[in-house]
Image (cartoon, grey):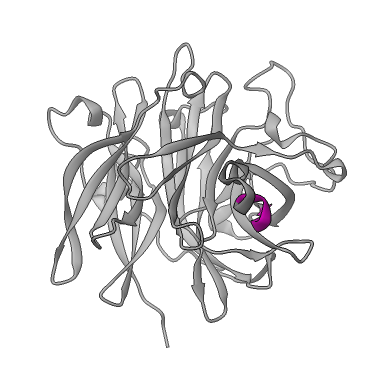
Amino acid sequence: MTAEPGNELEAEGVLNPATGHTPDGQLYLLPRLVANGNVSRVGLAAVELADGVPVGVRREGVVLAPDEGWERGTNNAGVEDPRVTFVPSLGLHVMTYVAYGPLGPKPALAVSSDLREWRRLGPLHFEYQPDLDTDLNLFPNKDTVFFPEPVPGPDGEPAYAMLHRPMWDLGWFREGEGVHLPAGVTDDRPGIWVSFVPVAAVEADLRNLVHLRQHRLVAMSEYPFEELKIGAGPAPLRVPEGWLVIHHGVTGEQPEGFDPTTQKVCYAAGALILDPDDVTRVVARTTEPLMVPETEEEKVGTVGNVVFPTAIEEVDGVHYVFYGMADAAIGVARLDRLP
């Protein structure tokens, strides 16, 4: 998918899509559409197949826009980088997205039964955890995505779990404030965390899905292709060994602030396997990237040299990864399991 010529809502690109199936089985992209001024909306586009392979899209409009006050600032606005997980036990698609509001990028949540009508549950709230000696709500946070089914929580009770990536530098908000790390964390690079919501709390009131607790660090950068930071991509996929998490690793130079056009970076894709009995534990991970920018569309765009996986779907028994290309277009790659 590339930006449609003359479409003002896509003037600065289409990228980083979520995906989902409507009740009739049709596969859809929910792409981030970027208008002039870096104002993002979430669109809906039916995926067109040829011999079972995704080859194009048919646009069906916008399903989420920065209409709420907390999704807009004086000089910015956006609902960005959606991740959608269908959760069968809830009978709902759960969308996590970044609300680019007055205090920068903050994670939020909306739900839908049909991918077309979305009900905001609001900004995510991270319950205070004394042993961290900080308030996770202070920090910008991105790359949020829910597991598709309940998992064992740290207390052994079944819980819905969400991966996320806090960013510890508060200098963007208050000059000179700098980095504030949680207790026990010594590396200030953004890494992958997980937080939980007890199943019983969500069954009592769906709105509790935004009230996360029992925060744990899952993974930090370890290998050269992850030198700057890592973050989760698509919803975790259950495989025989555990939960497969496709993630991005970043190298290069990233100046302060949130303007992507100032970055001189390379985004590559790697993978983790998380223990199904304890999703805070990594049991295996790739030492080399699975995919790096190679094509012209991946190397040249709003931010060059970016492959940014955000969704996995199975079509006729084959898994496909949908990903952002250089912050300007959307590509698809086949994901095969080697013998």
35 to 15, vertically: above or below: above
Which quadrant of the figure contains the C terminus?
Answer: bottom left
Left/right placement of residue 166 relative to residue 20 reads right
61 vs 138, nearest the viewer: 61
Q: Is residue 219 visible to us here?
A: no
Question: Which residue reaches farthest front?
Answer: 204
95 to 321, vertically: above or below: above
> Where does the magenta region start and end?
197-202
* Residue drawn at point x = 46 percent, y = 19 percent: 72
Q: Position of residue 51 (x, y in %)?
A: 13, 72
Q: Position of residue 264 (x, y in %)?
A: 45, 37
Q: Position of residue 174 (x, y in %)?
A: 69, 17
Q: Is residue 199 magenta?
A: yes
* Residue drawn at point x = 63 percent, y = 72 percent: 276
Q: Is residue 255 magenta?
A: no
Counting every numbered tag in the picture gives 0
Q: Main secondary structure of the magenta part?
A: helix
Q: Is residue 180 visible to us here?
A: yes
324 vs 266, nearest the viewer: 324
* Residue drawn at point x = 58 percent, y = 41 percent: 207
Question: Which residue reaches farthest top?
Answer: 74
Left/right placement of residue 223 relative to residue 268 reads right
Q: Position of residue 79 (x, y in %)?
A: 42, 32
Left/right placement of residue 321 relative to residue 204 reads left
246 vs 318, nearest the viewer: 318
Question: Which residue reaches farthest bottom?
Answer: 339
